[in-house]
Amino acid sequence: MFKKFFFSKRTVFLVLAGAVVLALLGWRVMAVRQALAKPDPQPVLKIRYCGAEPEELCVLSFGRDIDKKFVVNLFVPEGDFPEFYVTIKRTSGEGVYECVQNGEVPTSVYCLGDMVGLLEEMGVSLHSVEDDAQLAVGNFTLEALMVFSQSLGGSGNQGGTPTAAVGALTLNDEEPSSSGVLVTPTFVTPGPSYPNPSYP
Amino acid sequence: MTIWTDGLNVLLDRAWVVFSILIPILWGNILFGAALRKIFKTQFTDIEYFSLGMAGWVLPSSLWAALMLAGTFLFGEAATIAVSALAVVVFLFVLFSGKPKRASIWHSLALTALLAVSLVLQLAFLEKTILPLYFDSAEHYRIINYLADTYNLSAIDTPSTAYYHFGFHLWISAISRVFQPGIVNVMLVFGQVMLAILPFSLFFIAKQETQSNAAAFFICLLAGLGWHMPSHLMNWGKYPALFSLVGIHFVLNVGYLIYRNDTFKHRQSALYGLLGLGILISALIHTRSLVVFAFAALSVLLTIWRKTMPAMVQHFLFALVACLILIEIVFIQKSGVLSLLFGAYLRDDIWMIALVAVLMFFSIKFYSELTFFLLASLSLLMLGLFVPVHFPSLGGLTLLDRPYVQMLFYLPLSIFGGLGLAGLHQTLQRFSFHPKLLTRFTTLLIFGLVALNAGLRHHFYPSDCCQIVSRDDLAAFQWMDTTLPSNARILTASTDLYVTSFESANTLAGVDGGVWIAPLISRKTIRMRWDVNFAQPETHDEICAQELDYIYVGGMRESFSVPQLAGRPNGYLEIFALPKAKVYQVIGCE
């Protein structure tokens, strides 16, 4: 009877289901405990420019808006990363940049603040909103702002696929990543199989 | 990072979302399995019931989602809790009713392990995904969001005219409502979970036909990892099409049971009931599945008719169908739009095609009936690419389009492979030199070849072809949402959509992140062909006439031309710029 009960389909399923539920509960309990526990002082992360496949906290790109605000586009890894704001230290002073997290893709965060001039060295720092603790730091320099040449668009003819970078902010990480100086052109080199025709 | 570690990372990061999707599937599987056991008692093994349940779960699960929506519409938000509670009660009743049945714990553990491996491999795809890919996904998100709002409002508003694939959107919105993960996450994880579980539902039909576990598992392996389809559907964002495969597998299984009238003739009424329900739910998920069922039914009739013919005529009919397929291949290759159908299979799956081509000889010899059915179905599927249909709201279409047929090809090819392996086993049994050892060695070799091919050529990550959204786009969306007025009209880039053999270009499809503006931040977007010349004053006049306020430029090759926009500062003012995402304000309109 013991064998019949132990090896019944119902019991097997209950055991498996119970194991899954216990594992999920245990994981949840640990997550809550970690959240409630006093955090150990976290080491300050080093922030760099992102590579092709970002995995750690990094800067994706810099930009600007109509109000001459400087845009800092960040990748934040999944997991419990505290709400933060950015400060940028320059020779002319320090500015605070408010950050907004994307609702649907929480790993995407952008921050807005005072414009940074060309060739200015920037000390980018992330601080926790809760207690102003420094979370990450990195140094960058805006090397050049490429300006679009009028002649490319003035002819009135539809040119071929544009390859010139336009309006891009070239930047240099003071401690270069393994790939060296990274430039982010506005137009990427056409990929091998872009959708034309449809559904490639 | 390997595929395995990437998959595990995704599983850990999105465990709750995976759980949210697996629970209704397992719930549906167990309920459906219990219903089948009432009908068929001990006619099938546990693995066969499990396999049937791996497609049949869609019946109770869809009923649950439909009850959720109807209940919320009629009785308000409390209906969500009531229906979910009812689902739990029914589940417990099914679980504890009846006598406990002895089950093999090793079978259960083996199946669980296979499922887990399949899931982890498929989840690796999400490690490198930002949003669901291509332009279809944005529209699916929009409709799911609309249905999710219905739950919040407890009232159904006038449906959008662009409403379609109701079954898929209903199911995702129900999951999102009950378990509370974000819609984007549910869409992304849903696709990969479907890819992980879909192959298991093919075990049943193969086992019944060949009585060979090895052949049945081989079909599952081929269907899961042998071809670029159905995995490539996730690069296209074709979630309803993927979901419709569950319905197609289910109807195929039930149809097979009906066809085997001699074995299951006392269960015909129950089977016809299940068949009807399966067809209905499949149609709600994706209407084109009705065409597939019609073609399958026609193929069954042809197969039955062929069986009544003398042997010579049977051979002739077989050759006729084969010739028809060859002619159709020629016509398809001549069409620029349709030639992609075989291009991908020849480019990505050439070794598997070669393997299946060899195994087909055994399939034809030992399982000619099912092989003929599959060939006839293939022929009709390709014919559907050329049969025109006209809908007042949609314009000129064909019965089937190239992406849908391309998706379906994996199914007959996988079954050919399984039948061929079973036939090969029967051939090897005739050898006097250690037939069992030879059979096992050949099986291991063939399984190994497929696994090796999967390791070297299967694409577990998103393709470059179809990632049209970058992280710069996401920042731009957030900025636009906080900065632009809610009634802003934004111009986005698009290109012609070519999927039918008529090559009419009446439909425009988005080409960059602009497709996500309307679904994510609810700003109206208007599409224009990407190669519009902004340098011309007439273009500016046209844009002003359409009262467009802004222009969005993504980072794709077919995004609008930034040099042209920047070259007319009196007409277009750059108001937001990141390397791969820009927003221009239209100025200077008189």
Image: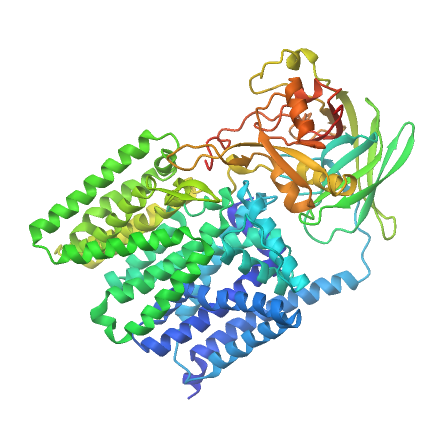
What residue lies at 43% left-to-right and 54% top-to-bottom? B244
Front-most of A59 and B241?
B241
Image quadrant containing the N terminus of chain A: bottom left
Work out which residue is located at the far right of the displayed protein and give it.
A93
Work out which residue is located at the far bottom of the displayed protein and give it.
A1
**Which quarter of the figure has residue B37?**
bottom left
Tell me: residue A125, above or below residue B182.
above
Q: Visible in this render: residue B9? A: no
Residue B430 picture location, percent across and down? 13, 56
Q: Is residue A184 left or right of residue A40?
A: left
What residue lies at 60% left-to-right and 57% top-to-bottom? B147
Q: Is residue B445 left or right of residue B480?
A: left
Image quadrant containing the C terminus of chain A: top left
Residue B573 picture location, percent across and down? 75, 25
What residue lies at 9% left-to-right and 50% top-to-bottom? B313
**Which quarter of the figure has residue A170?**
top right
Residue B316 picture location, percent across and down? 11, 46
Residue B329 picture location, percent across and down? 28, 36
Tell me: residue B536, above or below residue A194.
above
Q: Visible in this render: residue B415? A: yes
Q: Is residue B391 left or right of residue A70?
A: left
